[in-house]
Structure formats: C-alpha cells, structure tokens
Amino acid sequence: MDTSPQTDHCLNLPETDFPMKANLPTREPEQIKNWNFKKTYNQVQEHNKNKPIFAMPDGPPYANGNIHVGHALNKILKDFIVKYKSISGFRACFIPGWDCHGLPIEHAVSKELGNKRREKSDSEIRQLCRAYANKYIDLQKTQFQRLGVLADWENPYRTLDNSYEAAIINALADFFECGYVYRGEKPVYWCWSDGTALAEAEVEYADRKDPSVYVKFEVTKNLEKLGNPKEKTFLIIWTTTPWTLPANLAISLNPDFEYGLYTVEGENWVLAKDLAESFSKLVGKPLVLRKSFKGSDLGGVKKADSNFDGLVATHPFVNRPSYIILGDHVTLDAGTGAVHTAPGHGQEDFIVSQRYSLAPYNPVDDWGKFTDQVPEYKGIRVLDANPKIVQRLRDSGHLILEQVIDHSFPHCWRCHNPIIFRATPQWFVTMDKEGRHGQIRKTASKEIKKVKWIPEWSENRITAMVENRPDWCISRQRLWGVPIPVFYCEKCGEAHADPSTMRNVAKKVAKEGLESWYTSDIGEFTSHSKCKCGHEKFVKGKDILDVWFESGTCPSAIQETREGLTNPADLYIEGSDQHRGWFQSCLLGNVAIRGTAPYKAVVTHGFVNDAQGRKMSKSLGNVIDPLKFIEKSGAEILRLWTSYEDYSNDLAAGQESFDRVTESYRRIRNTCRYILSNLNDFDPKKDSVPYEGLQDIDKWALSRLGSYIETCRLGYENYEFHKIYHATQNYCTVDLSAIYLDILKDRLYTAKKDGPSRRSAQTVIYNVIHNLIIVLAPILSFLSEEVYSCLTKQNERSVFLNEFPKPPQQWTNPSLEETWNRIFEGRSVVTKKLEEARKEKLIGSSLEARVILTVPSKDQEIFEKKIKELPFIFIVSQVELREGEGFEAQVLKADGKKCDRCWTYSPKTNANPKFPGVCEKCVEALS
C-alpha cells in the first residue's frame, strides 16, 4: 500500500533486514560453511537419537569425474526424503557411498599413463587406480555438499575401503556356502575392446548397420525323413551375424511349426511354411511346395553324435556336420524358421545345445579375433570378418541373399564399442538351482511381491528382468577390483574354491588391505595341499569380481554394520536403469545370503533429458552442467526444479522450465519477506492472540494453512514432491498474495499498532511463515534456514531441529471456508468491475470506489453479517448490498474525503479537530 510522506510516521510500515535479492551463488556457500561449522547434520542425528530409525542407504555413484545433472537429481531427491523424515519423527541417517573399482577407472589411469603403462606393475596400477578414485570421491563430495545435501560426509562408505573389500569377499564366501556359485563355460557378454566379460547391467543398445544373409546348408544325412528327395536338399537359415557361422554346430527348428520341402530351380529348400511367401518375394524366386513336415519330424531328440536321429547338414565351408535340433526359442517373426545355432556365441543357442551335448565352441580370443581354430580368418576381428565370410559363401554358392540392415546391437556402456557373445570359463551365480534359500529366481520373485514399488509399473519391470535373466556372471578379467580368492591346480587347472579360505583372505584384507592377497603366500590362507590329480602346486586366480556384485553387497556390508541403517532398509531410491543394476544386484545378493529382499520400498526416478526430450550428449551440445548452473543461478533453483516435475517419468530440463521455477522461487521468497517485514514488532510469546480471539478471516487463513500442511505431508509421505511444489505455488499465489495478504494490508499498516485487530493478523501470519518454512525446509533448505534465522533471531538453532507441523484440530473449519468462498466469489466480481472502472478512468485507486454489490438471496445473510468488513475485503471505501439472483457489482465514486493516513474515503474524514485530515477509523488507531 502506498503512503503519503506526511503520514509515514504514524503508519505501521513494513521493516525487515531480510534481503529481497537472494544472491544465491554467494549466500549458499556461506550457509554450507555454517552447516559444516556447526555440524548441523550431527546435531540433527543427536536430536533424533531416540526416535525410530528410517533407513535409506545410498546407491553409490561411480568415482570417476564431476557430478552430472542425473547425480544432482538423485542426491537432491534423497536429501528431500532424509530431511523430511528427520523432522517428522524419525532418526534418518544419510551415509553417502561410492563405487570405486572397475574398468572405467582402470581405463582412465591407463590413458593418463600412455606408453608408460607397460612400465608399471599390476600393483602400481592398482595403487594409481585407488588414488584416482579417492581424488574424485573428494571432488564429488564437495560438489554434492554444494547442492545443499546434509549427510555424514566425514564417514562415507567406499567400496575401496578395507572393511568393504573384506565384506565383499565374505559375501562371496556366503554365496559359495549357500550353494549358488559354479564355474562353467558358457556364452557371456564380452567386450573385446576391454578384454573382459560384462554383466547385463553393463550393456547398452545402439543401432548399427550389419550384413544380413540367407544361407544354404546342404542336408546330407537321414534324408529319409524328407522322403529321400533325388535333388540336392538344403535347409535355409537367416542370420545377422555372419561372423558366428564358423562356430555353427547346429540348426534349430521349432517342433510345432509346419515346414515345407520346396522345389527351387532344380534344388530342394526346406523352410517354415508360414514364411515361405514372404521369403519367395524377398529372394525373387518361385517356391513350389512338394511336401509338409512338422519340425518334430525333422529334428533329432538324441545326443548329437554318429547315431543322431534327426537330419544332419554339412557346414558350408568347414568340414563339420551341423545337426538339426529342436527348440522352442525359434519364432516366425523373421527369417526362415530355421535358426543358425552357435552354442559358443548365444545364450539361447547354448541352452538348446546343452540338451544335445553340443559344447560351447568358441574360436575367438579375448580381443575379439579369430584364433588358429579358424585358420582362414586367424587374427581378424570378428566384425571385420563379416564381409570376408559373406564373400566366401557367395563364392561357394551357399549365399542366397545379402542385405544390409539397421538393428539394435549390444554395446559396452563404458567404451561404447560393440560387444559379442563369447563362451569362456567364468564364475556364475545360478538362478535356478536349489541352494540354502531355494532357487534365487523363485525366491527373488516372491520377495519382489512383498516390496512397495513406486511407481507401481516398476514392479512389473524388475519382475520381468529377474524372470528372464540368465545366470549371473560374476567374474571379470581385469586388475582393478576385488579378487575372487580361488586357487587353481598348476597341472590340471581345477579350481579349488573354499569358503573358509575366502574368509581367511577377508580377515587379512580387512587388516592389511587388498594388496595382501597378491603379496602373501598361498599357505597364509589355506592348508589345502593336494589336488585330485595328485599335484601339490597351486596358483592364485587372476579373476576379479563384477562391480555389481560389489555394490550388491551393500545390505550385508553397510545396512547391517552402520549405525542408523537396517536390513531390510525402509527405502531404496535410484534411477530407472537400476532395475538392471543396483536394485537387482542387492536383491539377488540378499536373497542368496539372507533369503529376503534388502528393502521394504523402492522408488524409481527417470532420467534428465533436454527440453525436447532428447538424451543429453556432448555431440548434441545439450548437456546441462549442474555445477555451472549453480554457479550462475544457485543450488536452490535446482532443488526447486527437482520438486517441480514428476520424477517418475523422464524429466525435461531447459531454460523455459528453469525460468518458470526461478519465478516461483522469487514468489515464495517475496511472500516470506513481506510477512517478515510485518512481524518486526511482534513477539509470538507476548503478542499472540488465542484462536477464539482471532477475526473470522484470520481463522479462514489458518484453515487454509492447515489444508496446505496436510497436502504437503501427504506429498512427502508418498514421495510425490511435485504435488508439494504445486500446492506451494497455489498457496503463496492465491491463498496468500491474491487474497489474504492483500486484504490484510490496511489492517497491518493502519490499525492500532498493538490493538487486537492487528495482533490477530500478526498471529496468523507468524503461524503461516513459521509453518511454511518448516514444511519447505527439505526442499528449499537454504531459504528456510535463512528465513528461520531472521524470524527467530536464533543463529545457533537450525530449522531442521523442528518438528513437521501438526495443525491444531480447531484450525480445520470446512464450514468457515465455505462461507468465505462465497464472499471471495463476490470479491472476484467486484475486482473485475473495479478494473473496468479504472480503464474507463472513473477511478484511479480502488479506494476511490463505492461498490453496490448484488448478492444471491441464499448468500444475503452471509454478506450482511460481514457488511462492516466488506470494504477491507474488497479494498474499497464503501460497500452497499442488494439482493438478486446472482453476483453483480456497480462501481461509483466513493462518498466523502480521502483520509491522509489510510487513503480511504469517508464522510467523516477531518471530523475530529484533534486529528485533522484523517478518517474515523484512523482516529481510533491514533487514539
């Protein structure tokens, strides 16, 4: 409200030290220093030490670079949850963690060394990797703190700590004791670029162009199954991986499909009848059907050997039979219904071949090159061999058609190179064999149903992934990681895996560190002296554990050992990619060791894309660096943006959304500042008015405050932070700024300074600001702390030492709200008419107006009871009521003279000679 200079001294003008400009990039670091100096996190833990535990372990980010916007989203969401639980009756610890082993760090160290890499010992490389990880842990720790995240930063968990590395080895021993680990040779995802096996969670898919070929395999044995045709007879296969043809051992048919024997240009071709027409059009050759057969009539059911009872074909360019076998994995989606089968290069191929005792033949080395088992292509990388193999088929007359197709192909998520399936000896966790806690797959599926999944669709996602995943390959062929402490016979190569030996290794690692495994004699770990073959010398295994096994050890390594955490935890929250990763590795690990899920609830959030919904990438130039954003705009804007969108879907980050959130922040901040400025003379302990003494509209404001608090409480409880954001915007913009605070201005500025009318208003706005900042503290932590310090004049006490508001029952008054809703409906009609009167130059300020309001008959009594308050509610000088069918308003010039103090027009202005120039209302205030 504007004031005249002549009357400023007698008005209750707003006054506050709270700055209008947030200046977040400067002020936030100061607040972080303050939190660190006062050990605010520890104060909160001490304050809540006797309360029930809320356990939420941190899914560890990887220690190999600056944080990105996805890291920021994840840590801020966790901070929301921990802070809310801390002020709502729980002891909620936040113990940050880091994944520290694995290929990316080893890669980075090797890249930094360049040619000097060859000069370094394995031990020196591991030490460099450890130093590299620690460097980025310290860096990320500072960056996470800059986001305003309160956590036990002085005592994080790191997978490179001696205690954690020992826990990993103990967990492996548990797996062995429970009967879930075996060594076998089967196809696994293999990164030829890095020379190591990969887990499913380490695989991403990208489109690439590859040759697609239709190939003839001549049937040479058991032709009587086809009626002994006189012409040459071929089974037709289709493959998009010609490089796997040297490893072909069989062709799979579906036992339930109908296959036809077709005459084609003097030859006989066999393929599925349902695909014959499309195949004929594709190759441009007419097919004449001669006979039909069931797949079960053609494929064998016995071991693939000299007595095989199915058709047998001859490999197109290798002197080797290709057995016709039966498998339900064969579909009619594409191809010919006859599937080229190389058990050393495909999971389904391996499974179906097992039934026929076909070994997983793999003529490819660790670096993706053919070995001397395929002399013609020895030393050639498999993908580079594709055109050579196709040409070989063309030259021999076995190629029917070649096409180039775009298809989704697996790639390594670290080096982003294409990967292959390759059979190698590895250590596996079985999903389907019985162990101490039943079959892992079945037990995990049962446990999934006991967990609360948010959003609900995520339950189906992880259920499908667990049900369809192969056995877990847990071994890797690298240096930087936790070793699999197994000894191998120097003579026969048999693995000697003993859980008690592993526990001995774990004890030494816990005491002396990981290098003790490499530097100690075998005799320090085991007294085992002789292999079954009679040989007495053993060598240490060189394999390390999959990093997902490491992070999946969190339930036993952290949840069961760190104070303030539990197994099962109350909540896990990570990105949607962790259904393949941490959610699943922790689930499978805890099921194997404890027989239960490691969590009671799981929240999944999406990824951060650009404003167009595209994945962020340097090549597109659409990456948002959270550190640069904070440097320019402040972490508080990023925190508010995190609450702005529904994180259960992918989030769109762009300038438009950030501008919208920035404007919202300004609105909230200005609301806080305005309220603070009107409390400069208010002491809540001395000046508060009891509820019974409050004015009606003040009671309405408390009822709206109570509704707002309850909406936000439910938003926090259900992890629906976007609902808190929108509730806050609506509350600050509509309930406060547009209605309540607008109406209060006259009372706050012109009513008697310590009179009941003004104190009633101040009592309510104090409750508003005090509750608002506590409700928003988990999200707008910097603003809430700043406002709380200004409001309470207590620099030592943090806002996070308060309890989440619980509105008194008497605040909730639906009938009162309904009454005021009718009044506000009339107010909106008046406001519209006042705006029209301004445009017509009938009035300037709304206080120059006298309003004649027509009110519906049903509301007449409501408005008549409030007749004295209506001028303040409508912010006009006079109001007259008339009865009618609906709300209508007429605006006239106000009667009387303008008061020099409150600017209201009144016939009684200047009537009191002691107070010249003021109205009767101001006379009362000044008296």
Image (cartoon, grey):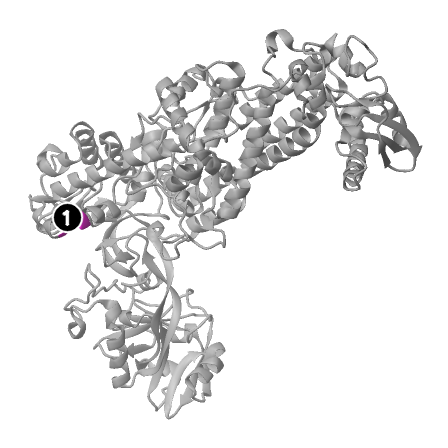
Q: Please tell me whether residue 112 belongs to the stretch shown in magenta.
A: yes
Q: Is residue 758 above or below residue 602?
A: above
x, y percent for residue 51: 47, 18
Residue at the image point whose x is 48% and y is 23% from the top? 785
Is the residue marked by circle 1 packed among few (<14), some (14-19), or many (20+) residues within 10 Å?
some
Q: How many marks?
A: 1
Coordinates of residue 689 in the picture (x, y in percent): 68, 11
Residue drawn at 87 percent across, 30 percent down: 859
Left or right of 424 in this view: 339 = right
Q: Position of residue 583 (x, y in %)?
A: 41, 41
Is residue 564 shown above or below 655? Answer: above
Residue 718 in view here: no
User: Taking 894 as reference, is 788 left or right?
Assistant: left
**Observer-nearest of 927 and 738:** 927
Quarter of the image with the C terminus in it: top right
Query: Farthest bottom residue?
Result: 266
Task: State whether residue 485 is above or below residue 325.
Answer: above
**What is the magenta range?**
110-114
Is 188 or 117 nearer to us in this picture?
117
Residue indicated by mark 1: 113
**The N terminus lies in quadrant:** top right
Towards the viewer: 163 or 180: 163
Q: Amino acid at mark 1?
A: Leu
